[in-house]
């Protein structure tokens, strides 16, 4: 309470000293702050020209605003718009093998309009950066994940098919429990699609999966923490827009993929990454084959915590070997052809990488862990006597052992857990450059 205010209450009039704070001009308009927890109020100190914060119950005062009370999404009153499933869900249907995916039926998404960038406001709990490695006037924001939490979990076992999986639905249940116990998610704020449910809106058909992805990012605000988990088959189809240096888009396979097509990485990026505002965190886990760049995030990190560049070394090794064999055969023309081909691929790969950084960097805070590289498969495994995806098991195991790891440490932990039993190598990619020595948050 200001001294002058106390005088006024005691004597019923203002003191004659015009310098008392209560007689000064009203304070300037308060900066937009996060909602204060119940029982806290903000007051203006004219001497320092700052706001300070008071707990009405305890009398504690402080200059820094207290952290906001946890906020939650109310459960959706209506299920996400439902893609009409087949009149009779497939029974005993023979799906094509993921190693030979069906023809790509992806249609280019509608043009995307970049959302406006909010003004810099440290009081809202996030910091905005201008980074020289991404296009001018493109800012990125690190989320503190103190806002609302929301999760989409998809697990497909493909029952009664020749490529049936055993652990994907278990993965969803394990991840659900993990999110609730370690990171404060609520079951009411989760949407779960599995192919053992009776509700047709909760079966992972292609349309249901796309609608669920739209639900996940809808109305996301700065510092909200969104989580996406997919456990099922992954594949590759021919790249039609030139954004893949290997010529193939990565995909996930809905239950009805044979009839209605796969969901490709371009489409998932357009749905779940592009609409996000600065300061929104999306953590994505793909436990599927060929998933290294399943969200088309342009920055891929090594276990040393640095951004991977176009892999000239592996291509160069193959080229040198081919040129050496041609030399031994005395085929000079083959040597020239091999080296020229390598040069063209190297130039093309670098151009594609720069193009993706320019077009697919995001102002939002998106982090993805995949079970393997684009060229690898992910294992349907058995761990601790339970069928599970190897990547889902490793992710849960690593963070239950130590919740406070940096991004680099977590990537190495995943690699360490899988190294002895599996050939797959988990990957970490982001929507913007990040300091891998900072703590993982969600």
Image: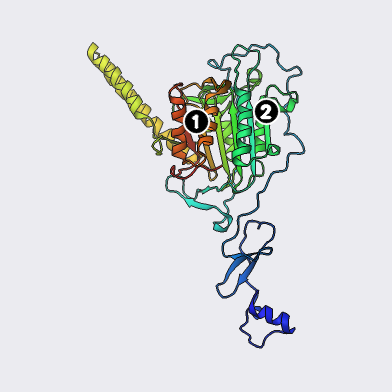
The image position of residue 402, as x and y in percent, is: 50, 38
Q: Check disc 1 and report the residue beneath it.
A: 293
The coloring applied to the image is rainbow
Q: CA distance from mark 2 to mark 1?
A: 22 Å
The image position of residue 68, as x and y in percent, is: 63, 54
Residue at the image position 67 percent from the left and 36 percent from the top: 190
- Bin the neighbour count of mark 2 within 10 Å (Cα to Cα): few under 14, some 14-19, many 20 and up: many
Q: Is 246 displayed left or right of 190 in the figure?
A: left
Q: Nearer the viewer, residue 186 or 110?
A: 186
Q: Nearer the viewer, residue 382 or 437?
A: 382
The image position of residue 433, as x and y in percent, is: 45, 43
The correct choice, above or below, for 128 with respect to 194 in the image is below
Q: Nearer the viewer, residue 404 or 303?
A: 404
Residue at the image position 74 percent from the left and 34 percent from the top: 79
Residue at the image position 45 percent from the left and 27 percent from the top: 425
Quadrant housing residue 295 = top right
Q: Check disc 2 and report the residue beneath it.
A: 193
Residue 426 visible, this angle: yes
Looking at the rendering, in which quadrant would you find the C terminus? Answer: top right
The image position of residue 390, as x and y in percent, is: 52, 24
Q: Are the two marked residues, 2 and 1, in contact with CB atoms closer than 8 angstroms?
A: no
Q: Nearer the viewer, residue 248 or 375?
A: 375
Quadrant housing residue 263 = top right
Quadrant housing residue 314 = top left
């Amino acid at each position: 309470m200001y001294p002058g205010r106390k005088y006024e209450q005691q004597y019923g009039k203002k003191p004659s000293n015009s310098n008392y704070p209560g007689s000064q001009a009203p304070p300037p308009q308060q900066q937009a702050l996060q909602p204060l927890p119940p029982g806290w109020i903000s007051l203006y100190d004219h001497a320092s020209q700052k706001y300070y914060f008071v707990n009405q119950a305890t009398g504690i005062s402080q200059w820094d605003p207290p952290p906001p009370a946890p906020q939650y999404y109310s459960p959706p009153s209506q299920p996400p718009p439902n893609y009409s499933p087949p009149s009779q869900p497939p029974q005993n249907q023979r799906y094509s093998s993921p190693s030979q995916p069906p023809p790509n039926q992806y249609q280019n998404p509608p043009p995307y309009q970049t959302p406006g960038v909010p003004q810099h406001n440290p009081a809202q709990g996030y910091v905005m950066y201008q980074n020289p490695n991404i296009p001018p006037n493109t800012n990125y924001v690190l989320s503190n994940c103190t806002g609302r939490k929301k999760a989409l979990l998809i697990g497909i076992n493909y029952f009664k098919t020749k490529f049936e999986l055993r652990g994907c639905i278990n993965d969803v249940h394990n991840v659900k429990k993990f999110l609730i116990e370690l990171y404060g998610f609520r079951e009411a704020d989760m949407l779960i699609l599995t192919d053992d449910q009776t509700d047709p809106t909760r079966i992972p058909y292609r349309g249901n999966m796309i609608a669920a992805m739209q639900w996940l990012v809808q109305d996301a605000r700065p510092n909200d923490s969104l989580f996406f988990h997919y456990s099922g088959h992954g594949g590759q189809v021919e790249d039609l827009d030139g954004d893949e240096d290997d010529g193939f888009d990565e995909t996930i396979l809905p239950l009805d993929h044979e009839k209605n097509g796969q969901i490709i990485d371009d489409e998932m990026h357009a749905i779940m990454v592009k609409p996000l505002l600065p300061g929104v965190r999306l953590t994505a886990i793909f436990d599927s084959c060929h998933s290294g760049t399943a969200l088309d995030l342009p920055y891929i990190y090594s276990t040393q915590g640095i951004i991977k560049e176009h892999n000239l070394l592996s291509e160069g090794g193959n080229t040198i070997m081919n040129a050496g064999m041609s030399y031994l055969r005395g085929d000079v023309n083959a040597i020239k052809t091999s080296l020229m081909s390598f040069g063209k691929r190297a130039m093309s790969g670098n151009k594609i990488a720069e193009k993706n950084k320019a077009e697919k960097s995001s102002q939002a805070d998106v982090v993805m862990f995949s079970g393997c590289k684009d060229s690898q498969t992910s294992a349907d495994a058995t761990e601790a006597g339970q069928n599970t995806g190897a990547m889902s098991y490793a992710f849960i195991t690593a963070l239950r052992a130590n919740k406070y790891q940096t991004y680099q440490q977590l990537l190495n932990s995943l690699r360490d857990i899988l190294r002895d039993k599996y050939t797959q190598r988990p990957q970490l990619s982001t929507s913007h450059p990040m300091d891998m020595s900072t703590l993982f948050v969600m």
